[in-house]
Amino acid sequence: MTTNAQEFARARGAMPGGVNSPVRAFGSVHETPRFFVAASGPYVTDVEGREYVDLVGSWGPAILGHAHPAVVKAVQDAAAHGLGFGASTPGETELAELIAARVARDGEAKPVERVRLVSTGTEATMTAIRLARGATGRDLVVKFAGHYHGHSDGLLAEAGSGVATLAMPGSAGVPAAIAAQTLVIPYNHLDAVREVFAARGDDIAAVIVEAAPANMGIVPPAHGFNAALARIAHEHGALLILDEVLTGFRVGPAGWYGIDPVPFSPDLITFGKVVGGGLPLAAIGGRAALMELLAPLGPVYQAGTLSGNPLAVAAGRATLDHLDAAAYARIDAAASTIAEAAASALDEAGVTHVVQRSGNLFSIQFAAEAPTDYDTVKAQETFRYPPFFRAMLAQGVSLPPSVFEAWFVSAAHDDAAVARIVEALPAAARAAAEAVPD
């Protein structure tokens, strides 16, 4: 039998840093990464045969639980007919129709009339930006510090998530001329939005925003913030791109768009994670007149050999089909229990913290007051998270290996799984209380 340490050593000899996505290296939590070989329901199993209650959920897609029987069967049935054809399939249309039907508000407001399937969230946001530029004839894009929209060149400026975890200001290899086309402003500050449009409004193609930010920990939008963004952008002839790669179909049947307290009108919405049911699939949606600027009907080019892969669309359809009201109720209830237990344990240990939530997504921030933007997120006592993480891992609970990530609960987190998490929290809270800065 191999060990996690042995697997990591072998991986480092074959891949940069031993990983194919930076956060998997466990660098910010000072721990050996776990190499998983199996997963079922709310549990994952590593190469050493140890089982963990999972609160990563493949970073969101495993919303029904790992290896959900209906999703597995759908993929197996699709695979039996071929892994891909390089041509259109009925399943692509069925998933596109399902996405459009679900993204509704009050049964009437339906911002998605056409859907383009792609393979990754990065590809979805990159395409949305290109489409916005093609539609407006403008070059500049406004984004918010701490928001992560994938790793395309123009969107890495002051991104959250992995970039924050690695303490990097951006990324090498991004030409200055490309970076200059992105205007980065503080989140939840409408005055900053107004100022940037007053100064550069005629050159701005779009504002891109995480619907409810989850890549710098959870930082909910201020009441009416998204609606104000839409109004300001539209007043200046720009578009609003709503990034729901994380929140789409996770926080509710219509994503954050469906539960934001103040109605608003995004022009384009990007989806990922849940929409592919765990396989590589993402999407862009919007009104027909805008979406049909994409090739082959319009001048904005986008293509992908594996876009709409039949296995991925089968997984996505099966996942969405089983995400009914009962499933969301189970997820919401489990998330509430875990979040409240985490807050209670940290209170008991005397650890300064807040637990921030956006629907069933939540995270711990080691700060006295709830962070509202990237600067206040970075000002928290991040040194408390690594020992907290390691204590949970030692007790068989797998948390996101970064303080700048959300916790993901699934419909498979039953009473037994939740109890294991709750039982592990007091020791982890004490470890956080004893932590000292590096």
Image (tube, rainbow, N blue to C red):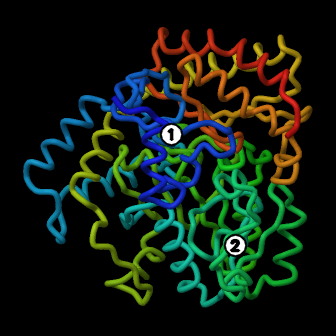
From the image, tell me which residue sits under label 2.
234
Whichever of callouts 1 and 2 sits on the residue coming sooner in the sequence is 2
User: Above or below — where is 403 with respect to 49?
Assistant: below
Residue drawn at (73%, 28%), measured in percent from left and top? 387
- Residue 181 left/right relative to 354: left
Location of residue 114 (image quadrant): bottom left
Circle 2 crowding by C-alpha within 10 Å: few under 14, some 14–19, many from 20: some
Residue drawn at (74%, 79%), measured in percent from left and top? 236
Q: Amino acid at mark 2?
A: His
Check disc 1 and report its element: helix, strand or loop: loop
Residue 261 visible in this rendered orientation of the protein = no
Can you give x and y, in whole percent of width and height, for residue 57 in the image?
47, 35
User: Above or below — where is 156 with respect to 368?
Assistant: below
Residue 311 visible in this rendered orientation of the protein = yes
Quadrant of the frame with the C terminus: top right
Residue drawn at (36%, 55%), measured in percent from left and top? 280
Location of residue 187 (image quadrant): bottom right
From the image, tell me which residue sits under label 1.
250
Q: Amino acid at mark 1?
A: Arg
Residue drawn at (31%, 84%), measured in percent from left and top? 296
In depth, the one of 104 and 348 nearer the eye is 348
In depth, the one of 411 and 105 nearer the eye is 411
User: Above or below — where is 47 with respect to 278?
Assistant: above
Can you give x and y, in whole percent of width and height, for residue 364 in the image?
74, 32
In depth, the one of 217 and 48 nearer the eye is 48
In depth, the one of 300 and 79 nearer the eye is 79
- Residue 109 left/right relative to 3: right
Can you give x and y, in whole percent of width and height, for residue 398 in the image?
54, 28
Can you give x and y, in whole percent of width and height, for residue 434 in the image?
85, 22
Check disc 2 and report its element: helix, strand or loop: helix
Circle 1 crowding by C-alpha within 10 Å: few under 14, some 14–19, many from 20: many
